[in-house]
Amino acid sequence: MGEAITVFFSYSHKDEALRDELANHLTILRRTNDITDWYDRDITAGKEWRSAILGQLTQADIILLLISADFLASDFCWNVELQQAIERHRKGDAVVIPIILRDVDWKGAPFGELQSLPKNAQAVTTWPTTDAAFKDVAIGIRNAVQELKQKRAQAKQKNLSQYEETYRQAIEQCYPLPETVQSQLDRLQNDLALSSQDVAPIKARLNSQIGEAHQRLEKYRQEVRHCLESNGGKITPISRTILDGFKGSYGLTDNEAAVIEQTEIAPYETKRQNLAQYESVLRATLQQENPLSQTASDQMSRLQIALALSDSEVQTIAEALEQEAKAQRLAREKEDQQQREEAERKRQAEAKAQRQWEEAERQRQEKRARQKQDDLSSERFGASYYAKLRDLLAAQNWKAADKETADRMCEVMGRQKEGYLQVKDIQAFPCLDLLNIDRLWVKYSHGKFGFSVQKKIWESCGSPTKYNQNWEKFGDTVGWKDPKGWPGWNAWYLYSNYTFEYKNTQNEHLPSPIYLWNVWYYDYRLCVEWGLFSLLLRPDL
């Protein structure tokens, strides 16, 4: 049923008989404990009547204004009771019901906007009987009581829900509750006007439900802590498997397990971030000054305190950075040593190359010095074998020298009878003889004639080894072929076409292949096939 609604009678003593009659019509509401009523005759002897009236007036749930001419004429009723009643009604602290007892002009009164009783605000004394009038009033009061009790029940239910939610949040965070939290809950209970009997069922139910669940959460939390402590603040794959098993056995949801893991991992993450921040600052400071100055040391100490790091933790960081710096220093020293060694090797290589060049230059100079004196020797026939060739060349008798060259080469290879050489003869021709012949031609023609001169032209034309356009280009360049003639064998010069006047030729056609290979007008293709190129391929030229 809930607590009874308190009813306050505000009336003039001249209307006391009507008040008593109304009170009798409210008997059922009193007997069912729906209301408890009070009026000034309930003041016991010895009490101050004014303070007693005001105390009841400020606590009443329903204030009945028994309106009559005498009520309106009473200063206390008008100035005190009516004013406070209207003020409490405006604040929503009380329900004020005007009851018109006797006919009176009450237009413009403060209660004029309030719904009055009996019906249509017809004065009680004007009804056929007062019982009928007070019955109507009693029904109106009952409706007001029921409406007020319903609102009070709804408000109480809201307060109970608020208390339950607050208690749930508190017990979910910590179970059992600390004294400080329990004190806060007691204050909330008092503020919400809830009794111990009201909140007892809430506490019992939540303690049973959440307490058991909290124990499961705490067990899982201990398992998470154990995994993190064993693995440096990280959940390894094997730890994940273990925790998933405990999560299932404790009946936890994924979200519940995740919240616990995140909560427990958070301090480790913070610690790692703080360690990384300290290391970064220390590294940057050491790059500026190493060892640290007193000022820098003091600043690092304050940073250690701000980041909540222990002495051992910062000492570990300092030692790691020192080892890192040492390793970098050794690496730089090693790199410097390697660079010095490389520079030394390079210097030695350059020195060796210089010595080799100087030696080669010396040998070239010696060779040039030797070449100043003609070497006329033959590997087979001995010294002065090429004296006649030298004399012909010195006299610039190029045609006779060309014939002498072919004769001597055939004689060296034992082919005087045949009068020409074959490929195998050129390949086997003595190096000394070939070089001496070539040097004589180059020397006395001032670099104009000679096998080595022809070889350079041959190489510039693509080093052809068969008859093709490159070979014809070679023939044009070296002077064995008419560059204005038709392509093919019929454009190659006869021996009679050769110019033997040194000053009148710009070609390098001597020595010619005519005598050497016995090649005449139509045999230049055979000249190639027989292997003139084998002479030009000689590496010693």
Image: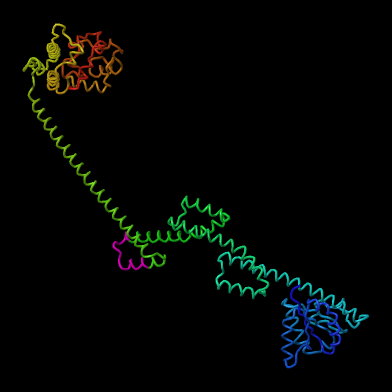
Residue 540 placement: quadrant: top left
How many marks can you see? 0
Q: Residue at x 7, y 24 (%)?
A: 373
Who is closer to the viewer here, 119 or 218?
218
Residue 331 is covered by the magenta coloring: no
Residue 376 location (% of width, % of height): 8, 19
Who is closer to the viewer here, 145 or 491?
145
**Colour scheme of the picture:** rainbow
Res 239 seen here: yes
Residue 299 is covered by the magenta coloring: yes
Residue 500 location (% of width, % of height): 16, 15
Q: Residue at x 61, y 68 (%)?
A: 167
Q: Is residue 224 above or below residue 376?
A: below
Residue 455 placement: quadrant: top left
Q: Is residue 40 above or below residue 147?
A: below
Quarter of the picture holding the C terminus: top left
Q: Is residue 160 left or right of residue 279?
A: right
| Most frequent secondary structure within the magenta stretch | helix
Quarter of the picture holding the N terminus: bottom right
Res 506 seen here: no
Task: Check the image and name the residue furthest to the top.
Answer: 417
Residue 332 location (% of width, % of height): 27, 51
Residue extent of the magenta highlight: 286-301
